[in-house]
Image: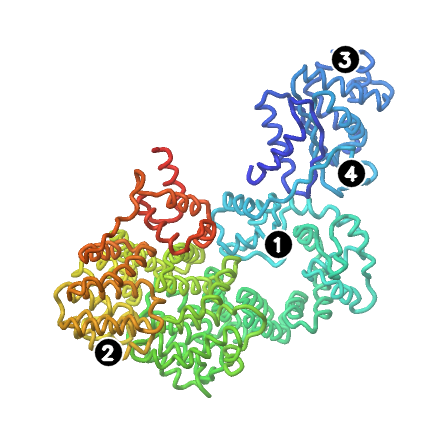
Amino acid sequence: MVGRDDDLRRLGDRLRLGEGGGALLLSGEAGVGKSAVLDALAATALADGARVLRASGVEFEAHCGYSGLNQAFFPFLSALEQLDDALRDALRVALGFAPGPAPEHLLVANAVVRLLQTIADGGPLLFVVDDLHWVDRASAAVLGSVARRVPGLGVSLVAAARPGEPGADDGRTLPPYDLPPYDLPPLDQESAGRLLRSRFPGLSRAAHQRLLTEAGGNPLALLELPTALRPGTAESPAVPSLSTRLEALFGSRVTGLPAASQQLLLLAALEGTGDLRVLQAAARHPGGGPGLDDLAPVERERLVRIEEGEQRLAFRHPLIRSAVVGRAPSRERRAAHAALAAALADRPERHAWHLGEATLEPDEEVAAVLEHAAGLALRRGDAAGAMRTLVRAAELTPEGPDRGRRLGEAAYLGAESTGALGSARRLLDDARQAAPAGEDSLHSATASALLLLNGDGDVAAAHRLLTSAVETSAGTHRYRADDKALVDALHVLAVICFFGAHEDLWRSYHRALELLTPEPPAILTVLGRTFSDPARTGADAHRQLDALTASLTDGSERARDTEWAREGDGADPVRTTRVGTGALYLDRLGEVREPAWQVVRSGREGGPARRYISALIHLCLDDYLTGAWDEALDLAGEGLRACEDHGYSAFAWYFRYIEAIVLGARGHTDESLATAGAVIGWADRHGAPCAGHYAHHAAAVAALGSADFALAYQHAEAVSPAGTLRSHVPHALWVAAHLVEAGVRSDRRQEAAAHVRAMRETGIAAVSSRHAMLVEASAALCAEDDEEALRLFALALETHGGERWRFDHARVRLAHGERLRRARATTESRTPLRAALATFEELGARPWADRARTELRAAGFAVAEPDGSGQHGLSAQKLEIARLAASGLTNKQIAERLFISHRTVGAHLYQTYAALGITRRTELGAALGALAEGG
């Protein structure tokens, strides 16, 4: 059983089967798994050689005296003959097998005790009673008497019941029967997730998270609720609909409540937060109605609890709320929504939602209120809520262009933010049917472009579609900078142009920005400079980016820029990821790390999927540049799963790139080149050369590491030919220094020198400290004169902030040390070489570490090989780190436990991967197990 090992062990200890016996009452909410636990206890008892008696209360037999005992003892009628005459006759009459006057209760109880002893025959016996609350009163009374005596009989008795459930005969609450209680809790989050994944492996992460929340650890709900999901989406209704089985379990106590109590309960179920002040105001609308005193019967039935200090009502289980709503007629639900809308007039989003639910016929005023509420939801980062609200607004919109426009915007949100691509396609079809012929909204066109990009279409087709839509809809948006549909379209157009990596594609983007009035939003201007041709125009965007990064925390830019008009606390995922995109090629992703992590944490809990993926991309790229490679690989794996879960195939290549470049830098050349090759193939098929440029970069790093300098040069030149930084190819920046190194080491010094001149003429040193360092280092590599080369290396290493870029900085130190040794400054060469070696070992960059060791030995410095202890070259510390990593600890947690740096942990793990022949953290457990088996 999933998640019940501890419960079964505790129950077994208390029942003491075969060790003197014991009794207990297993209680728990409906669907929590009491019957399954009883089945498991019975199966274990049988397997251990015990006898097992079973009985189960049945509602329609609850008025039949002794029907419960009849059910339990019917298979053992022959044992009755071994009882004394008085006991046998009393039990035969009680069980209905013989006529006669009703026997006394005590006589029947004594007969049952003796019969249990007879059936046990000196061995262990387990008596299992399920649904005790529906066992008839006579049987229940006898069982209560027996339960007090079983510990001395060697018999174990376990009964299960639902707390607060009406019993048989007179509606009494289930008595305790003097049985020690055991409250079976809901499944914990991890176990609930495991059960859900095992039965419904195809659920998206968002659906999985929402079902976990709605089920509240109730196993039956976990197995039944997925049927309420809308086909092809990650969504379930705001109040999930229940199967007949669930509704019977959770709703049976609702129907017996007074009408006023049921009305309050329905208001509470639909209101959602449990605010007693809102409930009271809604209950008295439009006049009269129940008061809060009418909640007393609801409390007595244990359906809700009142938290007096916070003035809130809480349902004791989420599915009680669902059952209340499910049993209410439509007319009553609409009336309750109308009352709540009136009570929430000062809270626009909730007012609009309830107003929409209370309305049946198309009503433009209500639709407009809902559209406004959708805008508010979007401004606080709730794209999924905005999408649902817009859909409802469209449903209530009279026929005409506004219906298509609202559906188009909902489709856009589904495609661009929430990850509901299936819903977006259907909404887009609805929007086209609602709009007059040839009058698709701009949001519809933007959604179409995104779906095309993530489907079988190519970049050029998506670009044509969107640029045409921007131009043809000019009469509507008039190039106003505050037109949301236009701004959203231009952001998507920037992504498409980036994928296409060609100046012709960007012309339409820049033309649109020139037409925006009164001025373009700052982020669109920054993207036009840093995301299109950063080598030439990126440095000019630093000042505007300063304000945008500051806006993520202090809101200064938002006051001036309508695009950032957001409300509420926390990171706005749209703003965070758009600013991160603008910061990427200026090497300023570190400034948006914390907001990006907030977006990732939100995404893991079901937040906007597209933004979750974008934030993961930004964190991965920054991790690679700053040397947090283990985290980069972990997040890349997470990103690939998110892309697969949500259908964002057009963005998976970013994570493949991270895998390829880290593996290449660590010496896994074949795997790196194969991964890069797969990305290049995808890029060619989809007309997305930018993805190919990233893959060529990764391949160049892998080839440099394996000393195949000709191959490295070939891959670098595929991004940008020697002597120029190709226009509107952003990644030409990141590959420039690699091309120079590969050129110098493959006897192409003239081409390498030409590329250095292009780097200087383009002015990339102003883009970031990393590029400033690499420009001087590249010039040093090409310098013929040793003195000039050493001067340039010194300049490179003096670059302020250069140490942040750990791999690049270490490579510059290595090249500096190599040049010093060749200039016969042997002693001086040891310092940069030792520093480079230390960094390479921490990063796990084995090929470069090997080069540094070779240079140090040539400089006369005794340097040890990596630890070689044990059959697999693993020291005790490395094995301990590997075991801790396999257990799920992060590098930081391992470092704190072992009192070492997290970078040392990363380096040791990488060396462990190489020794064990693995490439992933997730493979450690199996590899360590195999190592143990092999001795």
Q: Amino acid at mark 4?
A: Leu
Residue reaching furthest to the front: 827
Kindly check if marks 3 and 1 are in contact, taking CB atoms under 8 A apart as contact.
Answer: no
Which residue does the numbered mark 4 point to in the structure image?
174
Image vertical order of residue 108 relative to residue 546, above or below: above
- Residue 329 percent location from the top left of the image: 71, 56
Give the crowd class for mark 4: few <14, some 14-19, many >=20 residues within 10 Å. Answer: some
Which residue does the numbered mark 3 point to in the structure image?
83
Kindly check if marks 3 and 2 are in contact, taking CB atoms under 8 A apart as contact.
Answer: no
Which residue does the numbered mark 2 point to in the structure image?
760
Q: Amino acid at mark 1?
A: Pro
**Of marks 3 and 1, the one in the foreground:** 3
- Mark toward the start of the polypeptide (1 vs 2): 1
Give the crowd class for mark 2: few <14, some 14-19, many >=20 residues within 10 Å. Answer: some
Q: Relative to residue 62, is residue 543 drawn left or right?
A: left
- Residue 742 percent location from the top left of the image: 19, 64
- Residue 34 percent location from the top left of the image: 65, 37
Q: Nearer the viewer, residue 344 or 257?
A: 344
Asked where in the image residue 804 lies, by quadrant, the reply is bottom left
**Of marks 3 and 2, the one in the foreground:** 2
Image vertical order of residue 176 relative to residue 757, above or below: above
- Mark toward the start of the polypeptide (1 vs 4): 4
The disc label shown at residue 240, or none: 1
Element type at marker 2? Answer: helix
Q: Amino acid at mark 3?
A: Leu
